[in-house]
Amino acid sequence: MKIFLDSADINEIKTHQNSGFVDGVTTNPSLIAKSGRNILETIAEICALVDGPVSAEVTATDFETMLTEGRKLAAIAPNVTVKVPLTEAGLRTCSALADSGTKVNVTLCFTAGQALLAAKAGASFISPFVGRLDDIGKDGMGLIEDICTIYANFDFDTEVLVASVRSTQHVVDAALIGADVVTLPPKILTSLYKHPLTDSGLDAFMADWKQTGQSIL
Ligand code: G3P
């Protein structure tokens, strides 16, 4: 399963990139706003830092302007994936961009029906927002299961990119289901490393080792 970092913060991306676990980056207008920086400069800098796909989202809501924005974003770097919302105009834009060879990540997906349309529109990635569904008492991971089943039934190439991840359990559940990608806020990626028994066990090993007076080097 691929891990993308869900961030537009260059320093956060640099921090985690050295882990070797960052297979791509996703951004959205809120993350760009949070960075306080220019979108075009930020996406260019991220694309230079990360070899994998970097999602850059259009901000228009009409087809014509979405398409123009998408082409401009795609021209920034070869690893830009253009992000469009799961609306009628967004899917029209997805089809047009995909037909011209541009990879598209269709975002703000909340139903299996929406995901079916995105795959038929030629999306490279679909981004179902599991956390926001859980937030309203729905079954976010159930949606992931349904989408993976539908995509397998019809051999769609669209990759399931689990977004709005709120916990390490979401990551494990997505992996158990067989989702292609999870996009993680940096704090969730950090949490994946951590367990109190690992920390206490290492402390015990180090204390016992110190008693030996030995050194490996
Ligand atoms: O990539 C989508 C993600 O940024 C949304 O997460 O926590 O705002 O639902 P959240």
Image (spheres, rainbow, N blue to C red):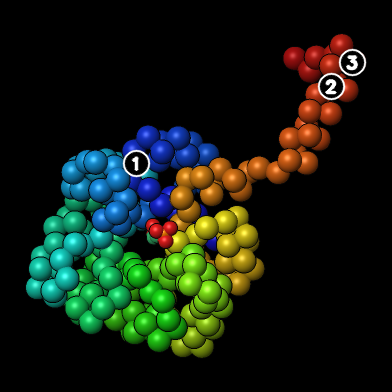
**Secondary structure beneath label 3:** helix
Question: Which residue type does callout 1 highlight?
Answer: Asp
Q: Is residue 99 above or below residue 15?
A: below
Q: Is residue 176 left or right of residue 73?
A: right
Q: Is residue 72 above or below residue 49?
A: below
Task: Tell me whether circle 2 and circle 3 mark residues in contact (CB < 8 Å).
Answer: yes
Frontmost residue, 49 versus 163: 163
User: How many numbered marks does the figure carry?
Assistant: 3
Q: Is residue 148 above or below residue 57?
A: below
Tell me what residue is drawn at x 29 percent, y 60 percent. 81
Label 3 Cα crowd, 10 Å radius (few <14 / some 14-19 / many 20+): few
Frontmost residue, 150 versus 90: 90
Q: Is residue 89 above or below residue 204?
A: below
The quadrant of the picture occupied by the C terminus is top right
* Mark 3 residue CB less than 8 A from any atom of ligand 1: no
**Secondary structure beneath label 2:** helix
Residue 84 place in picture, x, y as percent: 26, 68
Residue 58 place in picture, x, y as percent: 20, 62
Q: Is residue 79 left or right of residue 73?
A: right
Quadrant assignment, res 199: top right
| Residue to which mark 1 is pinned | 9
Q: Is residue 72 left or right of residue 19?
A: left
| Residue to which mark 3 is pinned | 211
Q: CA distance from mark 2 to mark 1?
A: 38 Å
Tell me what residue is drawn at x 45 percent, y 61 percent. 164
Label 2 Cα crowd, 10 Å radius (few <14 / some 14-19 / many 20+): few
| Residue to which mark 2 is pinned | 207
Quadrant assignment, res 30: bottom left
